[in-house]
Amino acid sequence: MKISVDFSALHELAKKMGDYPAIILPPGPMEFEPIDVELEKGAPVKPEDYKVIGDILPTIQGRQVVLYIKDHTYMRGTFSSFDNAVADPSKGNKIHVATCRTLEEMVQKNRFDRYVACNNITGQFEIAGPQGQRAEVPLHVCKNCLSLLNYRSSRDSTAIRNNLAANFDYQEFFKTYSSFFKQMPKRMSDDGDGGYTEDWPIISRSLREKANYACSDCGVSLVKHKHLCHVHHINGVKNDNALENLEVLCADCHRKRHGTSMYVSHIDTQTINRLRKQQQTMHGGWEEALKLADPAVRGELLIMQRRGYPAPEIGYEVVGSDGAVVAELEAAWVERRECLIIDEALDANVLGGAWRVWHFGEIARQG
C-alpha cells in the first residue's frame, strides 16, 4: 500500500504568511511505499531496481542507498567475523556509499548478490552471525568510496578518510546529494519543532523584516521569496532566542552553517543563485564558488581546482537564440566552454553543441 501526502497547498499559505516554519515540510507530494520500510533494515538488491546515478551513486527505485554485506558468518581463526565486528566495528564488512572499485570487483566476481541496500541514517547496521545471531553495529564506511567521491575532501589525506570512515554522518551524506532524489530516507529529518519556543514564528518574522529579508552572509535579497529567508541559531540551541544568537540567512547559507545537514531542494538552490547573480552579490574566486555551489558537486569542483582550473561561474544561465534561458548550469568555465551539471537530461546538444559537458561523476572517475 502506498501513502501519498501533498503539502503544496500548505506551502502556498506559508509563503503568503511569510513566516519561517517551525516544521519544515517537503517541497511537494511525499510518498511512502513498502520499499521505504524495507530499506531501513536492508533489502536484497534486485538488478531490475538497481541503478547508478553519474556512475557513482547507487539507487533502488529512485531512492539513494548504501550497500553492505549483512552476512558475517565466516570464521577468522577461532572467532567468527560476527564476533570480531561486534567487538570492533572497523573489522566488519564495510558500508559502500558509492560504486567504488571494491564494488566493481565484486560484480566481476559474481558476488554482488551478497549485498543488501539500505538508507538507514542511524549508522547502526544489522549483521548476521553463524548461529543465527543478530546485532546492530556501527560498521565503518569504505575508504575507497570516500576517495572516489572526494567527499569532504577525502582525497586530501589518509587522516581525513580514516576519521570519516569511523565517524560517518549518514544524515548529512544523504542531504549532501539530495539534489538527485525526490525522496529522502523515511526517517531522516531535522523536522518537527525541535525545541523552538512558541513565539518563534513571531521572533523570526520580526528579525527577517528588520533585515529586509536579506541574507547577512551572501547578501542576497529574498523580499520576493520570503520562504527562502531563514533565521539561524548560532549555538544550535533552538530555544535560545537571544539577539546575539540569531542571524538572518538565505536557505542555502543556513544549510551550510549546518554542514549541509539541512535539506534544501535543488530548485531552491538554483533560485537563490539566480537571485545572487541578478543582484550582483557574486564576486568570483574559488572560495566563493565552493561556498555557493550545490553541495552535491563540491567534491568534483575541488578536483577541478586541483587541476588548475580557474574558478567557475556558479548558476550560469545558457540563453537560446530567442533570448530564453535553455539551461542553468551548476558551474561553468565560460571562457573554456566547459560546464558541470546535475541534470542528466542536459547534454551538449541542448546547450547548442558548443560546450564540453561534465555530468556528475565523470570528473571523480577521471581523478
Image (tube, rainbow, N blue to C red):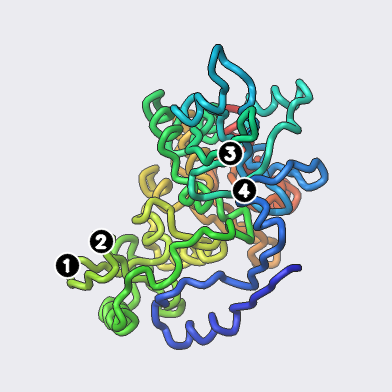
Of the residues shown, which amino acid type is indicated by label 1?
Glu
List x then y, in percent, for residue 81.
Answer: 56, 23
Specify the farthest residue to the front.
131
Comparing marks 2 and 3, which lies closer to the viewer?
3
Of the residues shown, which amino acid type is indicated by label 4?
Lys
State which tag comes first along the sequence, 1 or 3.
3
State which tag comes first along the sequence, 4 or 1.
4
List x then y, in percent, for residue 30.
Answer: 64, 69
Would you place residue 221 above or below residue 125 in this image?
A: below
List x then y, in percent, for residue 318.
Answer: 62, 57
State which tag comes first along the sequence, 2 or 4.
4
Q: Is residue 93 left or right of residue 32?
A: left
Q: Which mark is residue 134?
A: 3
In space, the residues marked 1 and 3 are separated at their CA atoms by: 49 Å
Tag 1 residue: 244
State which tag comes first along the sequence, 2 or 1.
2
In space, the residues marked 3 and 4 are separated at their CA atoms by: 12 Å
State which tag comes first along the sequence, 2 or 3.
3
Of the residues shown, which amino acid type is indicated by label 2?
Ile
Q: Which mark is residue 80?
A: none
In front of the other: 284 or 6: 6
Specify the farthest residue to the top.
77
Contact between marks 2 and 4 (CB within 8 A): the answer is: no
Helix, strand, or loop for circle 2? loop
Kindly identify the residue that appears in the image at 55 percent across and 41 percent down. Answer: 125
In space, the residues marked 2 and 4 are separated at their CA atoms by: 35 Å
Comparing marks 3 and 4, which lies closer to the viewer?
3
Of the residues shown, which amino acid type is indicated by label 3?
Arg
Tag 4 residue: 41
In space, the residues marked 4 and 1 are separated at their CA atoms by: 43 Å
Kindly identify the residue that appears in the image at 27 percent across and 78 percent down. Answer: 207
Would you place residue 348 above or below residue 1 in this image?
A: above
